[in-house]
Amino acid sequence: MRLIASSLSLCLLASMAVAQTPPVAEPTDQKTLAATVGLYVFPAKGQPSETQSQEEAECYGWAVDNTKVDPFDLAKKAEQQQRSSDAAKDQVAHAGEGAGARGAVAGAATGALIGEIASNDAGGGAAWGAAAGLIGGRRARRRAQQQATQQIEAQDRQTRQATAEEIEGFKKAFGVCLEAKEYLVKL
């Protein structure tokens, strides 16, 4: 009987403890403005979240004014640049189609002329010339495509590097403003 009474007492205490536990706030998926651009901000003086949101918006505007960089605009420009780069690469991939055939025709004509002069065999010379022209035309096309692709990729790297530097400058300005408003900021 004593064992049953102890068990009931424990169950009663446990249910009372659960009933008195304050509800836990559900985390939200919304990011703060600072978190969106990659800054970690802590209210060092216990500022409420509404005040922090307002001050982040003020500092965001201040950073845009002082750096002439808006990360949201840069993201749109980066997407446009990527689409443009992809289109240019696609165009390069299709450029020079038929170069092998044109090379074969030119090679056949040259080979026929040389074959006729050298050995009185225009047909054999044309065949050899066509084969050489086909190979040469395809090689030239491949080289031109590789050079154009490398140039596009180098331009992309330069653009991404410049964008990253602009965003870093913006983040520093944004962070300085928030630190002046007594927040702890980490990049």
Image (spheres, rainbow, N blue to C red):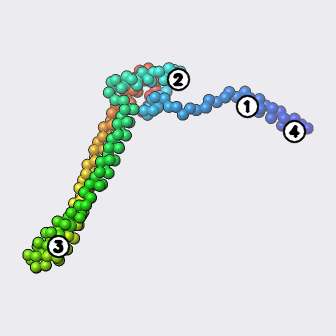
Residue named by callout 4:
3
For numbered disc 1, what is the local secondary structure?
A: helix
Residue sitting at x 49%, y 27% = 42
CA neighbours of label 3 inside 10 A, class few (<14), some (14 to 19), many (20+): many
Q: Find residue 11 and report its image quarter.
A: top right
CA–CA distance in space, label 3 to label 1: 94 Å
Residue named by callout 1:
18
The image quadrant where one finds the C terminus is top left
Q: Depth check: give the residue in front, 10 or 145.
A: 145
Please state which of the two labelled residues, at mark 4 or mark 1, is closer to the viewer: 1
Q: What amino acid is found at the position of numbered circle 3 in the picture? A: Ala
Residue sitting at x 13%, y 69% = 110
Rendered location of residue 35, percent (x, y): 46, 32
Whichever of callouts 4 and 1 sits on the residue coming sooner in the sequence is 4
Please state which of the two labelled residues, at mark 2 or mark 3, is closer to the viewer: 3
Please state which of the two labelled residues, at mark 2 or mark 4, is closer to the viewer: 2
Left/right placement of residue 172 relative to residue 131 reads right
Q: What amino acid is found at the position of numbered circle 2 in the picture? A: Ser
Rendered location of residue 92, percent (x, y): 28, 52
Residue named by callout 3:
126
CA–CA distance in space, label 2 to label 4: 51 Å
Please state which of the two labelled residues, at mark 1 or mark 2, is closer to the viewer: 2
> Which numbered marker is on residue 49?
2
For numbered disc 2, what is the local secondary structure?
A: helix
CA neighbours of label 1 inside 10 A, class few (<14), some (14 to 19), many (20+): few
The answer to the question of whether label 3 and label 4 lie on touching residues, with beta carbons closer than 8 A, is no
Please state which of the two labelled residues, at mark 3 or mark 4, is closer to the viewer: 3
Whichever of callouts 3 and 4 sits on the residue coming sooner in the sequence is 4
